[in-house]
Image (cartoon, rainbow, N blue to C red):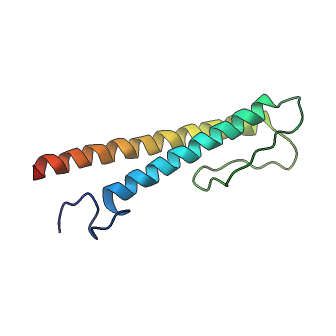
């Protein structure tokens, strides 16, 4: 078995590169969740905010039937923060693993 950062199959999207891409996507979804929640918070007492975009499957969002709820928005902010932190940890780990691999090969 080789120490290729492309993963055991040698294909892009597996191994370290796949983990990095997945973490970047997760961080992006967490960022979108924060933006959506911030828009909800900014619209308290105003008309209902309209948010467009794809669903964020890796970042759970508390769904409410009627209007914005400050408690749910606070929960959403905390969930998005934790998701962002977790994805950042994955990026740091894959960076360290890539450096170790390069050091051992070079």
Res. 16 image quadrant: bottom left
For image coordinates 21% across by 44% down, the residue present is 99
Q: Eyeballing the image, is 65 above or below 15?
A: above
Q: Is residue 75 visible?
A: no
* Residue 78 location (% of width, % of height): 61, 37
* Residue 41 location (% of width, % of height): 76, 31
For image coordinates 38% across by 44% down, the residue present is 91
Q: Locate the N terminus by quadrant.
A: bottom left
For image coordinates 26% across by 57% down, the residue present is 5
* Residue 11 location (% of width, % of height): 32, 67
Say whether residue 78 is left or right of residue 102: right
Q: Is residue 22 visible?
A: yes
* Residue 56 location (% of width, % of height): 63, 53
Q: Eyeballing the image, is 33 above or below 101?
A: above
Res. 92 image quadrant: top left
Say whether residue 63 is left or right of residue 106: right
Say whether residue 49 is left or right of residue 76: right
For image coordinates 28% across by 63% down, the residue present is 7
Task: Please state the total of marks drawn on the protein image.
Answer: 0
């Amino acid at each position: 078995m080789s120490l290729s950062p492309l993963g055991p199959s040698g294909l892009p999207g597996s191994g370290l590169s796949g983990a990095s891409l997945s973490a970047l996507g997760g961080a992006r979804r967490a960022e979108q969740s924060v933006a959506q929640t911030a828009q909800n918070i900014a619209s308290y007492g105003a008309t209902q905010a309209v948010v467009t975009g794809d669903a964020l499957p890796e970042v759970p969002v508390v769904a409410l039937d009627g209007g914005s709820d400050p408690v749910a928005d606070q929960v959403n902010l905390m969930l998005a923060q934790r998701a962002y932190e977790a994805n950042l940890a994955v990026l740091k780990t894959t960076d360290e693993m890539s450096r170790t691999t390069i050091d051992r090969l070079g």
